[in-house]
Image (cartoon, rainbow, N blue to C red):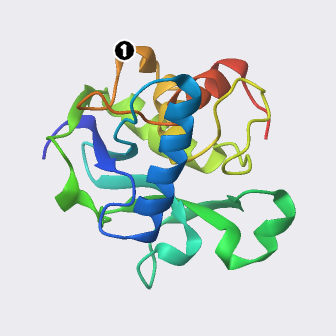
Amino acid sequence: MTGSSADLWWLPVGAGGCVVVRTSRWWESLRALRARRSPRPLFHAVLEVFDGEARYVIEMTPVWGGPAGPRGVVVEGAVGAGWLGCSRLFRYEIRCWRDGVIPDRQWAVEPPHRLALSPAAAAALIERVGSAPRFVWGRDPFGIGDMWNSNSLVAWLLENSGIDTGAIAPPRGGDAPGWRYGAIAARRGPMS
């Protein structure tokens, strides 16, 4: 790949696993019941950014689910409640992994959504990953009915890069919980 851009990959939540798939389905079923609608497929967003010289995989995942060895971890945060973050089981990591891999890429339901970025904008996006908010995963400190999670990170990065995330939607009528939260967090400015 030459030039600069960002590829937005939409992966089914829990692809390749079984626990997250089941718990996510139950959660979405309850959410759909409350909203009086049919359950939707849930998606997890991952960015693959090309700055003209290198490729970076940017993703938020549980600490315990990552591959062994260096993987570009730049930020960690708590899952569920701040005090739970004392345990590895309740921590997430944000990766900005040069030449990294997307472990669940084979389950992507469609090719990535290509986003045009200048070399300077791509470099700024990569640099910005380390300053992402450290909100507790699954919480809603803004009280907007959405939560901070992996999709929020990607939306936050794109909004801060001047890309309108309101014009981007997950595939196949699916949902990306946290997407709206990331956009709002970007517009509200620093608060972590």
The residue pinned by badge 1 equals 167
Please tell me which residue lies in front, 124 or 184. 184
User: Which residue sits at x=80%, y=35%?
Assistant: 141
Mark 1, residues whose alpha carbon is within 10 Å: few (<14), some, or many (≥20)? few
Left or right? Give the position of 64 relative to 119: right
Of all residues, the one furthest to the right in this rendering is: 83
Q: Is residue 166 above or below residue 176?
A: above
The amino acid at mark 1 is: Ala
> Quick check: can you spot residue 50?
no
What percent of the width, then of the height, locates residue 47?
36, 45
> Quick check: can you spot residue 150?
yes
**Toward which corner of the image does residue 176 lie, by quadrant?**
top left
Please tell me which residue lies in front, 183 or 143. 143
What percent of the width, then of the height, locates residue 2?
14, 42
Left or right? Give the position of 2 relative to 159: left
User: Which residue sits at x=65%, y=44%?
Assistant: 131
Left or right? Give the position of 181 relative to 172: right
What percent of the width, then of the height, locates residue 87?
75, 77
What percent of the width, then of the height, locates residue 10?
30, 43
